[in-house]
Amino acid sequence: MDEQLQKDRNSLDKKKKEQGKYYTGIFQDDNGNPDFRGLGPILKGMLYLFLFSVILADCNIYFVFPLLLFFIGRILIAIRFYYIETLHKNGHDIYFIRMNILQNYVEGFTALFVALYLLFHNFLTKKR
């Protein structure tokens, strides 16, 4: 087992020398390092939005409409940020733009998930 680990480490070192980076994944930044900086606030906001919505709604069907409006608004904001070209051409704020896009999509779809949860919970638990 130790030989296999050493072989993997040597191949990683070789890859590092060839490409100049170790990590090659979906969270890779320009230098080849994993970049999770934006995921913490997004996941925390997602959790708070879900808990706040469920507690405040208490499975109230009328809370679905503001959540759907919030979902539509967040998706429209994300699309707006996606089509910003001026900041991207300068090359300075591309990380800011990408994180805004991701954050708005995640918050919007979390609101949609909560709205669907409230709808299905209300209809499935209705006494007949």
Image: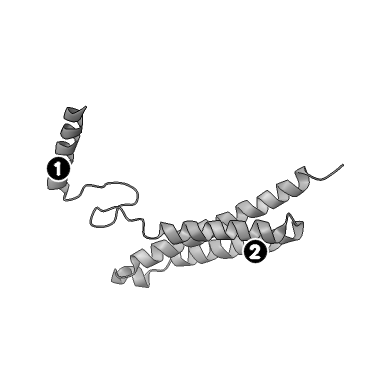
Three-letter amino acid code of the residue under disc 1: Asp
Residue 98 showing in the rendered view: yes
Q: Which residue is mark 2?
A: 69
On-image quarter of the C terminus:
top right
The extreme front residue here reads 2
Q: In the image, is 20 to the left or to the right of 30? A: left
Specify the quadrant of the image occupied by residue 30. Answer: bottom left
Q: Which residue is rendered at x = 60% and y = 60% of the image?
A: 71
Q: Nearer the viewer, residue 98 or 117?
A: 117
Residue 51 located left or right of residue 3: right
Horizontally, residue 96 falls left or right of residue 49, namely left
Report the quarter where the N terminus lies.
top left
Residue 13 on image: x %, y %? 14, 42
The answer to which image quadrant residue 111 occupies is bottom right
Q: Amino acid at mark 2?
A: Leu
Is residue 10 shown above or below 70? above
Foreground: disc 1 or disc 2: 1
Mark 1 residue crowding within 10 angstroms, few (<14) / some (14–19) / many (20+): some
Estimate the spatial distance between the alpha carbons at disc 1 and disc 2, rounded to whole Å: 51 Å
The residue under the point 40% across, 66% down is 97
- Provide residue 53's location: percent of width, then percent of height: 64, 59
- Residue beneath the point at 25% across and 47% down: 23
Q: Which residue is mark 1?
A: 13
The answer to whether one can see residue 82 in this image is no
Picture quadrant of residue 86: bottom left
Label 2 Cα neighbours within 10 Å, binned few <14 / some 14-19 / many ≥20: some
* Residue 126, horizontal then vertical, whole percent: 81, 45
39 relative to 91, above or below: above
Q: Secondary structure at mark 2?
A: helix
